[in-house]
Image (cartoon, grey):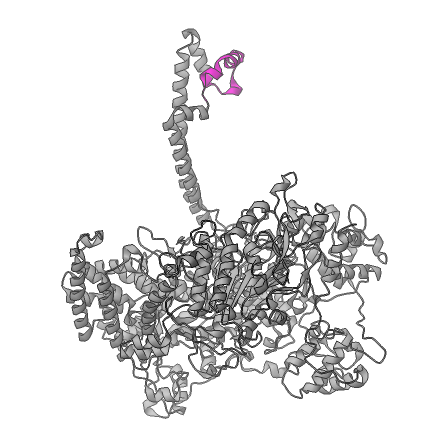
Amino acid sequence: MTTPIARRDFFSSATDGLYGTALAYLFGRDLYGGSGLLAADSRAALAPRLYDLTPKQPHARPRARAIIQLFMQGGPSQVDLFDPKPKLTRHHGQSVFKDLAADVSSPHAAGGLMRSPWKFAQYGESGTWVSELLPETARHVDRIAVIRSMYNTHPNHEPALYKIQSGKLLPGLPSFGSWIAYGLGTENQNLPAYVVLDDPQSRLPVNEIQNWQSGYLPPVYQGTRMRPTGSPILNLKPEKSRQRPELVVDASRRLLARLDRIHKKQRPGQLRLDARISSYELAARMQMTASDALDLGQETKDTQQRYGIGNSTTDNYARRCLMARRLVERGVRLVQIYTRGQMWDNHANIGTSLVGACQHTDQPVAALLDDLAERGLLDDVLVVWGGEFGRLPIAQVRPGSDPKKAGRDHGPAGFSIWMAGAGIRGGTVYGTTDEIGYRAVENRVSVADWHATMLYAMGMHHEDLYFDRHGFRERLTGTDEVRVVRELFA
Amino acid sequence: MRILAYILPLFALATALPGPLTSSAVAAPPAASIYETDIQPLLVARCGRCHANGKTKGKLDLGSLAGIQQGSESGAVVVPGKPNKSLLVEVLSEGAMPPDGKNRPTAAEVARITDWVRRGARTRYGAFSVKATLTQEDVLPILFTRCVVCHGGRQQKGGLDLRTRQSMLKGGKTGPAIVPGKPEESLLVKKIHDRDMPPPRLLVDFGIRPVEAGEFETIRGWIAAGAPRIDVIPDVATSHNDPLVSSEDRDFWSFRKPLKHAAPRLDDKTLAADVANPIDAFLLSALAAKSLKYSPPADRLTLVRRVAFDLTGLPPTWKQVETFLGDAQPGAYSRMVDRYLASSHYGERWGRYWLDLAGYADSEGKRSADPIRPHSWRYRDYVIRAFNADKPYDRFLLEQIAGDELADYAGAETITEQLRDNLVATGFLRQAPDGTGSDIVNTVVERFEVVIDEIDVLGSAVLGLTIKCAQCHSHKYDPIPQRDYYRLVAVFGGAYDVYDWLKPSFVPGQTKSKAVGRVLPYLTSTEQQQHKVARAAVEKQIAAVKKALTDRQAALQKQHAEKRLAGLPEAIRGDLRKMLATPKGERDTVQKYLAGKFEKRLTITTAALKKQNPQFKKLTTTTNDRVKKLQAELPAEPQIRALWDRGEPSPTWLFRRGQYNKPGHRIGPGVPSVLTDGRTPFAARPPWPGARSTGRRLALARWLVDPDHPLTARVMVNRIWFHHFGRGLVETLSNFGNAGTRPSHPQLLDWLARTLIEEKWSIKQMHRVMMNSNAYRQLSAIRPAAEEVDPENRLLWRMPLKRMEAEVIRDSILAVAGRLHDSPFGPPDPVDVRPDGLVTSRESPDGWRRSIYIRHRRKHIPTILETFDLPQMIPNCVERPDSTVASQALHLFNDTMIRSLADSFAERVAREAGKQPYKQIERSYQLAMGRMPSDAEREIGLAALEELTRLWRLRRQEPGTTDKTSKKTPPSQRALSTYCHTLLNSAGFLFID
């Protein structure tokens, strides 16, 4: 395993005196003019105000120093995975449409109640119920807390995704990842604080880059897409056809440094010029660190196999799970892994499409938990699994079509997610849905509750993490009444 | 067993969410409090100044049980058992009340009130009850939200109109909708109860959600009570003073009209010598108070670069520099400023600032599909032209806010350019993200978001106030009661009616109802003609391509017929040919007979022909492809993305807590009371006799451009100042309220505001005034002594050092490289999106156009612009962030387009300067920096070119190098290219002194 480049080493390797000073000033610190500050931040009086990624003190003792979010966008079906409902079997086919109408996006294909085609069993010492579709995840139930009572407030992907990412049904607000980067900074200045690993073989998820935007927070806090092939970060390297010999690049860098030094010397005291000059050095340094972090060749064959690398069913997702481990190891604060296309959006043929989605992810996810645990990382890395909503307990099938081709429509009123690591009480099953698995009824967990709970794990209080915008204190959880789900933690 | 039993309780559950959660927060006092003894005296003592003894600010009386039960204009203030839902507890525990912080209740007192509420708000006479008589005002908002789309003004399905009590009594084809006193006999109740209405399967199509349980109870309760009706007069500013807005509130600096102060006299002679115009007098007297003075004036090279970027966003051409340097006459500087003000690039620069405020975009946003707005660019062009023509700012606002109400366009015989512009200008209020073109997000909630965003745009861009907070509750920092917000909503009601909505556009696959988009067809006959000509040209091409195919087909078919005819007796061939040539309907009996017998044998179907003749098959495919492509090029039917008043708006109800399903009382149109004398009614009337329009927005616009308006001129001059001097006199450009900053130079701000009005709202004149001051002509260098006194340069003892903004970087690199295609206006240029996320604008044979003409699709903002802080417009941008991050360095250093432009830059240098390296270096500096290189820079450049040439030569000599370009381009040229690329990355290029 390679050692991440330490902050100290980086300074000592910056040989040029001028650059050293400038770096000390900048070093991941981005100069930004605007307004706003973290609660109780004494830098308030500084001007121009600085927004940077240097590590910040949390409000309280953190349980987690990093989060890996296994984001299952599209809406995994809770009644087929984590929330068994025998009543569905008993009342299979019965129409309840009028009661659910408010949440049905395609009313013309609304069928009757639909039983789950899969068997559930109890696993581990806790006896948590898991469907036969997730045998590998089931091995870990004693590490996992399943929340069965999550709910979202819109039955359509776009608004629901905005909500789960940023707390409101609208675009333009900072994602919770940006809030975490803003509140805590990051431990490794040579890597982004908030990394997004979307599927390199499929299109961007619904809402695209707006899933990890920073909204009104400074752009330094937005998620950075890292890609396993080519340039890990956009423009981190020139395109092949545009590459220059190393010696030419060196000469060009030296030339730039000399010209900028003259320019700067004639303009003493201009902090912005220092920052700019340093940003070029930082960019150069990033090229090395980022490529190294994503280099899975440094992992043993055995590790690769355990994740499912090399197996065509799992390879793509497995690689990103392993990258996520390497990134949190190097101090990245939040890694978000998106799944392939809309594979959990099983409107039709749920009998086969859901199987595919599970097979694609089950082994890599379980291997990630094993790996994190073995390396002691699970103690302070929070792993979160789930989508923007779940699915309805009724069939979605056009009248007259083959019922075997039925799927399930979006179900925001109640769905399941799970969390593990970072002091999460394993084996917990929290909250319930009603008897058909439609709506969360007991210990309901709103998206804001869930956000606040993740902030809590990171040592932040949702009310103290705010951004002052034109005299208005903006928070991730807004003005909602919010409850941290402390019961999830040991 | 019916499974419904398990689900029906859901209805009830909807209203019974988890209760209070802060159970352990406060230790309970020993005995439960009673209102009369424990609470009332306390409230009177602490809140009585405004909410007791006859004073009812915000319609709230805390002095009596009846008053507290009645609640405030924001709704109930006490919800027994639920402190978290009780406004009274909220404002007291947050410290929001009393607003001035005086006579605040102690923590123990707040705890006592909280506990009283938690324990059910007991009174001496038992339970606390909110007695309320339901009236039609409780029911109508529900029906407007859930029903009137089909049973209202536009449609009366089943002959039913639910907009008034009267029409409900009348009912529809199946009888009256309500039977007062008998809910169980009322069809309205039955249909809703059985969930037949609103029809569950049509909800999505009509943007309706089912009636909520509480709403149903309200409807039933109202009917049960006999469906009482009260007379309602919408809440408007009247002769009564608004209790939430006091005369002290109106006395706040920015709410008073600006006065023209005389410029201060400077006694110090050296200081007085620095005064070029009153701006300097104001600034210098403030500086003198701190024993500071201006920095020395900048040299001409610095000035011409500064002015060029400030006014056009492009580097000065070397010719422009030489002209200015060569002008030895007095007034050379002012003339140089005037030349740039006259440039057509001025509107592209300053129009962009305005487009940021409007939130300009070429797509609807909100949805993943991010549908394109095909007509948005007309507004963009309008703005650029308005700036270039120096359209007076008051006229500019009138057109943009109420262009549709300035003159009768629908009844006009000809559409003049002015009439067209009036409508195009209203695009200002059509820029907010709007996803309602998709059925699934076209409910009142999402519609109201559009209205909120547009009010936000108006407030932040024009008014300089953040009024958004008042959407949910009366403003905490500014004296803007919630009702003021809804008065603005009512102003927009004629055009944006959330109960009677027009979709922005038709989104394929996401829209069922084909209701036309919110566009108008009133273009000038010239434009219509141009469109027809352009369309006809493409149509002609299509026809020609199609004809080539049909001709070929006819020829082949004829061949086929001849071949078959050859096998038939010669005697009948002539008749058969005639028969084939005669259209079916015109054949005589003989021909018909012949056709029946022979036609099949003589003809061949297209499908068979394709099978038989591969060439023809290929021709068919290529033709179809070509036709498809040409059809895509057909210019869109010209339309104006406008906002217009449609007349007869639905009523506006205040939404308590900003929620559509918590309607309060009925509100009429008006403007924020604190900005008026509080007595003058808002005068909205139809703008011309017989107009359908309400005239509400016209009244708003006229009020805004009144010369004595306290904010309009101040906000605008402050923005112009900000763009020239890097910092606003009021730093919070869009917040002149209490939470905003106070002006650093209040008298100067007012002087500028008055000057704008005196100069007939000419913006160009304001540039002249500001740029001809000596303040603007200072150096930007830091003087340590001055920095110690005023580190933020608030007093303006120097000019700021600025980095180019996003568009300026891109446009300047293009200009320097000689690849800028100088062609203004028209539909935006498309962008390409690479799988790795890189978004680039597409190059045309003539190069790239300026950034303002790139398609601004929200989800696909060109990477270079985004990297350099072009924000997403949600809904607009009042001040761009200004960041320095590594990704910017990465982009300029590694990006392919930048590298290719560096090649063009180098080719241009070689072309214009020849082969001599020192001449090349000089020319590079002239083009990129607008100056000659210094001796040091010359030397460094020469050494670098030499080294780079050597290195590139090495590369060429490397055995087995496959680099084709190295072989084609000589090493010296590649070296020059690398050198030019480095210059484009250097601080000297990117920063403006």
Which stretch appears magenta? B580-604
Q: Residue at x 58, y 55 (%)?
A: A75
Q: Nearer the viewer, residue B486 or B223?
A: B223
Residue A425 position, x and y percent, is 60, 68
Q: Is residue A414 magenta?
A: no
Residue B338 sits in which quadrant? bottom left
Q: Which residue is painted at 69% across and 81% down in the image?
A: B26
Task: Estimate the x, y position of residue B363 in percent, counting from the top left.
Answer: 49, 56
Q: At 38% across and 87% down in the image, what residue appears?
A: B284
Q: Position of residue A435 (x, y in %)?
A: 71, 56
Q: Nearer the viewer, residue A220 or A187?
A: A187
The image position of residue A340, as x and y in percent, is: 49, 53
Residue B69 is left or right of residue B608, and the answer is right
Name the dominant secondary structure of the magenta segment: helix
Quarter placement of the C terminus of chain B: bottom left
Compared to B914, does A422 lie above or below? below
**Which is more toward the observer, B673 or B52?**
B52
Q: Residue furthest left?
A: B916
Q: Is residue A197 visible?
A: no
Left or right: A137, with B555 as reference point: right
